[in-house]
Image (spheres, rainbow, N blue to C red):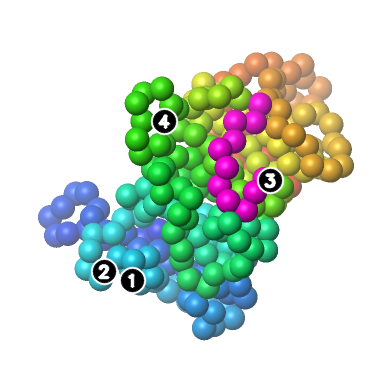
Amino acid sequence: MDISEILGESSKPGSLVPTKSAIYVWGYNQSGQTGRNGKERQLRIPKQLPPELFGCPAGNNARWLDIACGREHTAAVASDGSLFTWGANEFGQLGDGSEEGSKYPKRVKQLESELVKSVACGAHCTAAIAEPRENDGTISKSRLWVWGQNQGSNSPRLFWGAFKPNTMIHQVSCGAAHVVALSEDGMLQSWGYNEYGQLGRGVTCEGLQAARVITAYAKFLDDAPELVKITQVSCGEYHSAALCEMGEV
C-alpha cells in the first residue's frame, strides 16, 4: 500500500466504552487518498482528519468502525453504517458512479439504504459487507457489495458470485486484482486475476476469472486436499491466506 492508516480512540473520563474515534493518515498523497485535499504530496507525520470533513460537527461523538486503503484510495465505515471514500477513482473505486477522483471524503450515496459493517480495498476496487436498514427477516443480514476495477460497475452492486443468494457473508479481503469472500458457514469463494495462483484453484491462468467456491485445501503441496471450515481470510497483492477452525494456516 502507498499509505497507511490507524484508528485512534479516546473516551470520556471514567468511561470504559470509547465514545469517540479519529482517523489518522500519512504517506503518499498524489490522488488525495489521505483526505488532506491535496495540500501535500506526502505526509511524513500522521495527521488527524477533522470531523467536519465527514459532515460531523466538531465535538460530536463520532466513531469509526473500519478503514481500508487501496493503492491510491481510502474507505472508512462510520458507526451509523455510512461508508465514506476518497482518493483516486479512475476505475470507479469510490463507488459514486463516476470516474472522477475526490480529495476529500464523500459518503457513498448508493449504500445509504444499507448499514455498512466492514470494508476492504484492492488496488483499484472496493468491497463492503452490509445489512439492509429495513429488513423483514427474509434478506441476508450480511450481504456483499463490490465496485471498481474488474467488478463490473463504478457503483456498488450486490454480488453473490458462486454463493447462493442470501448467503451470510462473514468477511471479504482484496488483493491487487483479486477478491476472496468468506461465508458465515466457513466457505470461501474467489475471483479476479490468477496469474500466480492467488485464487486457490490449484492452477494459474491468464485473464479475469469468474467467482468459484474453493472446496478443499491441502496443508502441504504433496498432501491430498481436504474439506475444512475457514474462519478468517487475508489477501496480499498477489497471494492469499486463510485460517481454519483448528487454528491452522
Q: Earlier in the sequence, mark 1 or mark 3?
A: 1
Q: Earlier in the sequence, mark 4 or mark 2?
A: 2
The residue labelled by disc 4 is: 141
Is 180 part of what is drawn in magenta?
A: no
Instruction: Please report contact status of discs 2 and 3: CB closer than 8 Å, yes or no.
Output: no
Other-residue count near label 4 (Cα within 10 Å), few / some / many at <14 / 14–19 / ≥20: some
Callout 1 amino acid: Glu
The answer to whether residue 65 shows anywhere in this view is no
Q: Nearer the viewer, mark 2 or mark 3?
A: 3
Callout 2 amino acid: Pro
Q: Relative to 228, does residue 113 appear above or below in the rendering?
A: below
Q: Earlier in the sequence, mark 4 or mark 3?
A: 4
Highlighted range, magenta: 151-162
The residue labelled by disc 3 is: 152
CA gap between label 1 and label 3 equals 33 Å
Q: Quadrant of residue 33?
A: bottom right
